[in-house]
Image (spheres, rainbow, N blue to C red):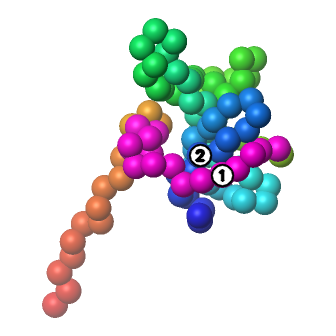
Amino acid sequence: MKENDIVTVVTSSGEYVGKLKSVTPLTLINPKMIIRNPENGEMGFARGIAVTGEENAKEATFDSYVFVVPTNDGVANAFQDATGEIVTPPKPSIVT
């Protein structure tokens, strides 16, 4: 895993997805807590990472976690949609 990869962090308090800023200390950009709808089991992102924390935190540092893994493509794409990050390919250029 490298800087700017979208990763999943599992902690004793829940599961979080974000863009990796650094490993030491473990810091995520635009962290999102994973939640499940109890009625239908669908997964989504909470608007905050702590009940009393600010909404849509720009960054979070984790001092205690169980493990970190690359996020699967479906969740990574949903994260990019949720954070408004649009990735566009570079414009082609012609060199003469």
Residue 70 drawn in magenta = yes
Give the class, few, some or many, for how many residues have Cα within 10 Å of label 1's Cα (few <14, many ≥20): some
- Among numbered discs 1 and 2, the one appearing first in the sequence: 2
- The residue identified by callout 1 is 68
Q: Which residues are magenta?
A: 64-80
Label 1, label 2: how many angstroms apart (C-alpha)?
6 Å
Evaluate if marks 1 and 2 touch, with contact meaning CB atoms under 8 Å apart.
yes
- The residue identified by callout 2 is 8
Q: Nearer the viewer, residue 52 or 94?
A: 52
Q: Which mark is residue 76?
A: none
Q: Is residue 35 left or right of residue 89?
A: right
- Image coordinates of residue 34 in percent, x first then y, are 56, 30
Q: Image quadrant for the N terminus? A: bottom right
Q: Is residue 10 left or right of residue 75?
A: right
Q: Image quadrant for the C terminus? A: bottom left
Residue 2: name its quadrant.
Answer: bottom right
Residue 25: name its quadrant.
Answer: bottom right
Kindly identify the amino acid type of the residue bearing the numbered disc 1: Val
Q: Is residue 71 left or right of residue 90?
A: right
